Image (spheres, coloured by chain):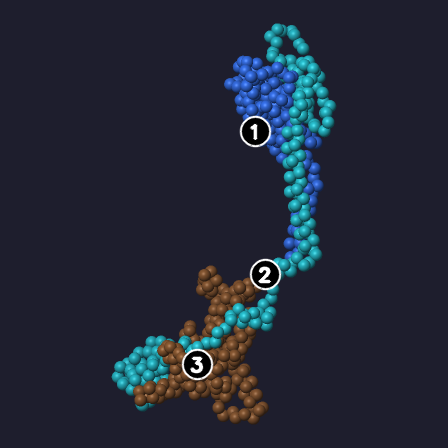
Amino acid sequence: MTERCKNIELRLTAYLDKELSEADRQDVATHLRDCEECRQALCQLEETLAFLKQAYDSYPLPEVDLDQAWKEIEAKVNFGPSRWENFLELFKRPMIWGPSIAMAAVVLMFFVRLNVQDRQETTGSVAHAPVEKVLPPEPEQPVNESTDGPVRVCQVESVYSRSGNVMLLQTAGSGQPLIWILPEKKKEGEKS
Amino acid sequence: MNKKKNIVTHSDDELVTKCLGGRKISCNDLFKRHYEKILRHFMVKTRQKDLAYNLTQETFTKAFGGLKTWNRESKFSTWLFTIAINVSRDFARQQYRHRANQHISLDDEDCAWGNDASLTNTQNTPEHVFQEKELKNMLDDMISLLPEDEREVILLRFRGDEPTFKEISKIIGRSVGKTHELFGEALTRIGKRLKKYHARDKR
Amino acid sequence: MKIAIYTCQALVMVCLSFLLTPTYILAAGMDLQVTVEVVKADRASSNIDPQLEEMVRDLGPTLNYTGFSLLKKTLLNLKTNATGDVILAEDRTLTCRFLGYDDDQARLEVRILDTGKETFRTTLLMISGGNVLIGGPQFEDGVLLLRVGAEF
C-alpha cells in the first residue's frame, strides 16, 4: 500500500459519510477510479459498516417496563411541583381559602336570594283574592288608599282630564286603582 | 393514538421547555422517546441486562436532574449521550478501582464489563432469530476486541439518528480528526475479524 | 400572588355589598318595565278573552261590561325620564314617562293624547308587580280599558 493509498484510506470513512470538503471528496473519488486496492478497501469498509449497523439495530434488548422505570426516576429527581400542585398549594394558605370559601358562600347566597325574590314577586302579582268583593256600586267612591292586609297597591298621585270628569275607584279584587274617564260633557259651563 | 401523536409532534426542544415548566407529561414523553437508544447503547457495551438497565436509569436521572444545563446548541440526544458516556466511564473507573483493590488482573480492559452475555432465548429458534443471535454474537465478539476509546466511537456511530463525527467528537471529548482516526482503526479491526468469519463460513 | 389575594377580597366585598343592598336601591339603576294592555270593553257581547279572565275577575261588578277583548299588549322598557308610546287608535296615543324611583315605588306619568292634544294625564306611584286601570275613552261600540303595569 502506497503512502497515497494510506492517506486515502484514512479519509474513506469521512468520504462515505459525505463529511469531506468538495476538494477532498474529488481527490478521493479520483484516486478510487484508478486504484483497485483502495476500491476494495472501500468495499470492505461498506460491508463492515453495513454489518455493524444491522447487528447494532437488531441487538436484542431486555423487556423494560417503562412506566416502572419512569417512576424510579421520578422518585430520584426533584421535578418540582407541577402547575396543578402549585395551584393546590395556594389553597393551603388561610389567606387564600378564607376569601375563596367566603366568596363561594356569598355567590351561593346571592343565587338563593334571587330565587326567593322571584318567588315572592310572582306570588305577589298572582295572589289576587279569587273571592269577589262586592263593593257598593257607587261611581264616586273615594279612593281608598289604605291597604287591606299585606298586599300593597299602586297609588294615584294626581289626575287630570280635559273632560273634567274622572272617577277614582278600586278594583274589587286586588284593590288596585281604577281611573274612570267620563265622557266630555258638551254643555258649557258645567263643571263637576 | 393521541399519546403517540404528542411524542411525534413536539420537538425535543419544546418538550424540554414544557418539562422545565412543570409539565411532567412532557418529561415522560422525552424519557420514552430516547429510552431505547440509551438502553441499546449500554446493552451492546455491557452485554448484561441488569447493568444496562441500571446505567440507563442513571443516565436519565442525571439528565432530568440537570435538564436546565442543556444549552440547546447541540441536539438533545447528543447531550444525552454525553451523559451516558460519562456514566459508563465513571462505572468503568469504579470497577477498575474495585478490581485493583481486590488484586484482580487489570490486563484486559474488557474485564471492566464482564464477559457473560446474560440474555435468554436459548430454546429452539426460528431462522431469523438464529441469524440475529449470530449477529449478536459476532458483534459481541468484535466489540470486545476493541480498545475502550475505539469502542466508544463505534457504539456512538451506530445509534439510530446517525450522528455526525462532529457530534461524536463532542460526546467523547476529542477532536474530530482523532474521532475519525479512532473510528477508522476500529473499522479496520472489525473488518479483519469479519473476513475471518466469512472465511470460516465458506469452509 | 398578592394581587390574587386582594382581587379575591375585593370580589368578596363587592358580592357582600350587592347582597346586603335592598332591592329598591339596586333598582335605582335599573330600567322600568311597563306593560300596557289595551282592552276593549263592551256590553254588546259576552266574550271574554282568556288572557283577560284574571283582570275581569279582579274588576268585579264595578263596571257592568260583559265583553272584553285584548286589542294589544305592549312592553316598554323605560330609563329614567324616558317616554314610551302606545297607539290606541288612529289618532289616539298613550304616552308613559318614567319619572324615577321614590323609595320602593316608581313614578310614572301616563297621558292620553288625541290628535296630539292631551286629553288625560295622571301621575302614578307604581309598585313592582302592581298595575293601574284607566278606562272610559270611547272606542267603537264600547270603551277602552288600559291596564298599566310596572315591574322593576
Chain identifier of the cyan chain: A
Residue at the spot x=59%, y=70% of the render?
A: A75
Q: Amino acid at mark 1?
A: Leu
Q: Which residue is mark 3?
A: B122
Colour of chain C, in one word, is: blue
Q: Which residue is mark 1?
A: C75
Residue A177 appears in which quarter of the rendering? top right
Q: Amino acid at mark 3?
A: Thr
For the residues carrying marks 2 and 3, which lies nearer the camera in this image?
A: 3
Q: Between residues C44 and B29, which one lies in front from this camera angle?
A: C44
The x and y percentages for residue B70 are 52, 71
Residue A87 appears in which quarter of the rendering? bottom right
Q: Are marks 2 and 3 on the same chain?
A: no
Q: Between residues C22 and B13, which one lies in front from this camera angle?
A: C22
Farthest-out residue, left: A34
Counting other residues with Cα less than 10 Å from the Cα at mark 1, is it few (<14), some (14-19), or many (20 or more)? some
Marker disc for residue A83: 2
Counting other residues with Cα less than 10 Å from the Cα at mark 3, is it few (<14), some (14-19), or many (20 or more)? few
Instruction: Name the quarter where the C terminus of chain A is drawn.
Output: top right
Colour of chain B, in one word, is: brown
**Above or below B88: residue B203:** below
Q: Are marks 1 and 2 on the same chain?
A: no
